[in-house]
Amino acid sequence: MTVATAVTAAASGLAAVCLGFMLIALLVSRDRVDEAVRDDPELQDLGFDVVAAVEVFQWVVAGLLLWCVVAVVLALAAHQRSRPARLVLAVSAGLAGLVSFLLGLLVIFPFLWTAACVTSVVLLFTGRAAEWYAVRSAGPVPAPGAITEL
């Protein structure tokens, strides 16, 4: 379980940082987009509102950023043996894997997130994960494979 939650937290955290920078860049460059559309007749003749498309893209990036933050929180909760968090995290990772796979058809980089999502889903339900989630104890129990003594 340690590996599954670490992979999820690392991949989601990295994606959140990238999306955060992208959102900041989009918000800061908003005036430049408006100016570019006004100055370029080809952008005006595209048949759709470029400024509105950029605004929709900003909301999509913000939504993906929120999804990444929630995934990190779910990974932390799953690491604390929360069964609902485990299930929601698996569904979220499956959906994220599908989205990143579809984006990966356009560019190679999202395939890294696809691999991380698939790894998380597999590790959440294989090996000794079921035993680990079945244990109820008063204190924290080390995850399978964790180093408990030096």
Image (spheres, rainbow, N blue to C red):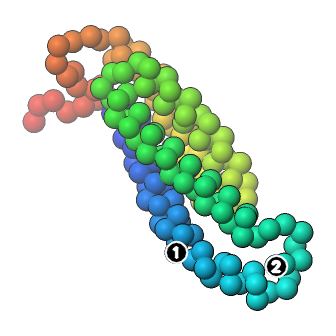
Q: Which quadrant holds residue 71?
A: top left
Residue closest to the eye, 16 or 150: 16
Coordinates of residue 82 in the picture (x, y in percent): 36, 21
Q: Farthest residue to the bottom: give it.
A: 39
Location of residue 133 with respect to 68 vertically, above or below: above
Q: Which quadrant holds residue 107?
A: bottom right
Location of residue 86 with respect to 97 vertically, above or below: above
- In the displayed structure, does residue 136 sit left or right of residue 116? left
Residue 28's mark? Answer: 1
Q: Amino acid at mark 1?
A: Val
Residue closest to the eye, 34 or 90: 34
Residue closest to the eye, 106 or 89: 89
| Picture mark count | 2
On the question of residue 31 being in view, the answer is yes
Residue visible at 36% across and 16% down in the picture? 133
User: Label 1: how many residues lie within 10 Å, few (<14), some (14-19) or many (20+)?
Assistant: few
Location of residue 31 with respect to 101 vertically, above or below: below
Secondary structure of the residue carrying numbered label 1: helix
Coordinates of residue 80 in the picture (x, y in percent): 30, 26
- In the displayed structure, does residue 18 sit left or right of residue 137? right
Residue marked by disc 2? 43
Residue 71's mark? Answer: none
Residue visible at 60% across and 74% down in the picture? 30
Residue visible at 75% across and 81% down in the picture? 37
Cα–Cα gap, marks 2 and 1? 20 Å
Coordinates of residue 40 in the picture (x, y in percent): 79, 86
User: Label 2: how many residues lie within 10 Å, few (<14), some (14-19) or many (20+)?
Assistant: some
Residue visible at 22% across and 25% down in the picture? 142
Quadrant in which the N terminus is drawn: top left
